[in-house]
Image: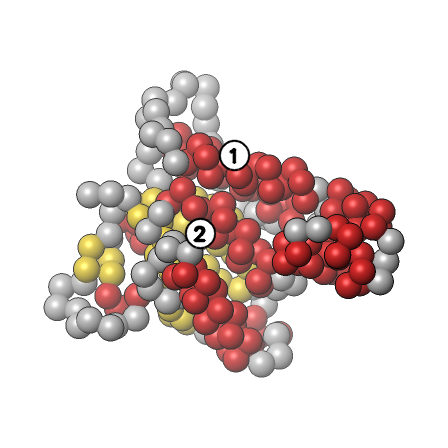
Amino acid sequence: MDDRLALIADVADSRQIGEFPERRDRLLTELSRRHRANGWTRFDYAVTAWDEFQGLIDQPAMLPCVVWDFWCAFRPWSLRLAFGFGPVEPVVGADEGLPLNQAVTGEAFYLARAALEALDSPRHGMSRVRLRVGAPDDPRSMTCNAVLRLADALVQDITDRQWQIIERYEETGKQTEVAAILDVVESTVSRSLASARYWELKASLAELRELLSRPMDNNVAPSGEELD
């Protein structure tokens, strides 16, 4: 059975966010629409608690794209993302049309839940870590965590102004147009993208996607030890 990518996510300090349920639902509706259109998922994201929701990605190699989309959509909130690679199966007796969390189960969701619980007990010095990937094969989880932990650390330092420029650039693809929209000189756009480490982030995520699209070697060198 082919692996899928389960997501369990939550938003820190959500009780302090005004109109949180309505804003959360709007974001998840738009992400569900876009990710369905991209062919990444067949299910809408399902809210499972006040601050928690789940998803299922049919193409695990799209993990970096999904992560980036959530980072962009949910900022400036502190979003924790836990993923699990693995098989899934329909819930016995589930009717068609049920939400994801009532329709599908399996190892991918168990691994995602374990990954989220691991975020609750970070190792010394890693309290800012907001993302973890679980997988039955160590090379895949270790590779994802090695890249995405560092990427998340960079993302947490992006300012609101830098995010504004990033969003406009991703909409237009041209720094000159971003400068015109925001009424700044083009060099300001260029400096902001560079200061946000935008190019390094996007390159790292693209290369991780390429790596995940290839077969992974399950043999890990004895010295390779993943940090929790």
Type of amino acid at the residue the image marks with label 1: Glu
| Residue 142, percent from left and from top | 45, 33
Residue 221 sits in quarter? top left
Residue 172 sits in quarter? bottom right
Name the residue at 79% across, 46% down: 190
Q: Say which residue label 2 marks.
A: 82
Residue 158 visible in the current orientation: no
Assess disc 1: are there few (<14), some (14-19) or many (≥20) residues with their C-alpha within 10 Å of its C-alpha: few
| Residue 170, percent from left and from top | 63, 54
Q: Earlier along the polypeptide chain: callout 1 or callout 2?
A: 2
Question: Is residue 101 found left or right of 189 in the rendered image?
Answer: left
Assess disc 2: are there few (<14), some (14-19) or many (≥20) residues with their C-alpha within 10 Å of its C-alpha: many
Question: Which element is circle 1 on?
Answer: helix
Type of amino acid at the residue the image marks with label 2: Ala
C-alpha distance separating marks 1 and 2: 20 Å
Which of the two residues, 12 or 164, is positioned nearer the viewer here?
Answer: 164
Question: Is residue 149 found left or right of 94 in the rendered image?
Answer: right
| Residue 41, percent from left and from top | 35, 57
Name the residue at 37% across, 55% down: 39
Q: Quadrant of the N terminus?
A: top left
User: Is residue 221 shown above or below 3?
Assistant: above
Q: Say which residue label 1 marks.
A: 207
Name the residue at 56% across, 71% down: 14
The number of numbered badges drawn on the structure is: 2
Residue 77 sits in quarter? bottom right
Residue 77 visible in the current orientation: yes
Which of the two residues, 112 or 125, is positioned nearer the viewer here?
Answer: 112
